[in-house]
Image (cartoon, grey):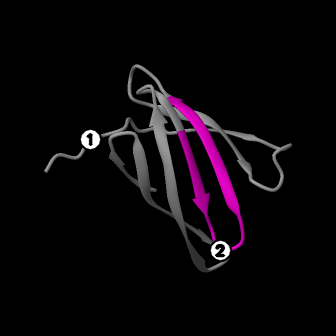
Amino acid sequence: MGLLRHGEVITGGAYYYYEKRLYHGDVKGDIQGGDDFYVTMTWQSRREIYKGRIDAQGHLFGTTYNEVDRDHPAAWYMKERLRCAHQ
């Protein structure tokens, strides 16, 4: 996943490989209050909602669910800390 942050707005892309096929998804969302993370990933056949927080060490964690099936959320976290890109 690659994300760009412009103020509170987040955009980017995500990829995964499954059954010898590469899938691409578009990412759009925002960060509110500096720590609350909310994005929607739009894949070919579905949309997934990701909600989370950034902890004091720069790790991102939260829950995700399919937009159509909100009753089955899954927990997620990033092992690597977020990095800022400078121009």
Residue 47 colored in magenta in the image: yes
Residue at 17%, 46% (x, y): give it: 86
Q: CA distance from mark 1 to mark 2?
A: 29 Å
Residue at 67%, 76% (x, y): give it: 19
Looking at the image, which is closer to me, 7 or 39?
Answer: 7
Tell me which segment is drawn in magenta.
38-53
Residue lying at the far left in this picture: please name it: 87
Amino acid marked by disc 1: Cys
Amino acid marked by disc 2: Gln
Place of residue 54 in the rendered image (x, y in percent of width and height, measured from the top left): 46, 28
Compared with residue 34, is residue 73 higher up or lower down, i.e. above or below?
below
Query: How many labels sit on residues?
Result: 2
Mark 2 lies on a secondary structure that is: loop
- Disc 1: which residue: 84
Q: Is 69 on the left-hand or right-hand side of 41?
A: right
Place of residue 62 in the rendered image (x, y in percent of width and height, measured from the top left): 61, 34
Place of residue 28 in the rendered image (x, y in percent of width and height, measured from the top left): 50, 55
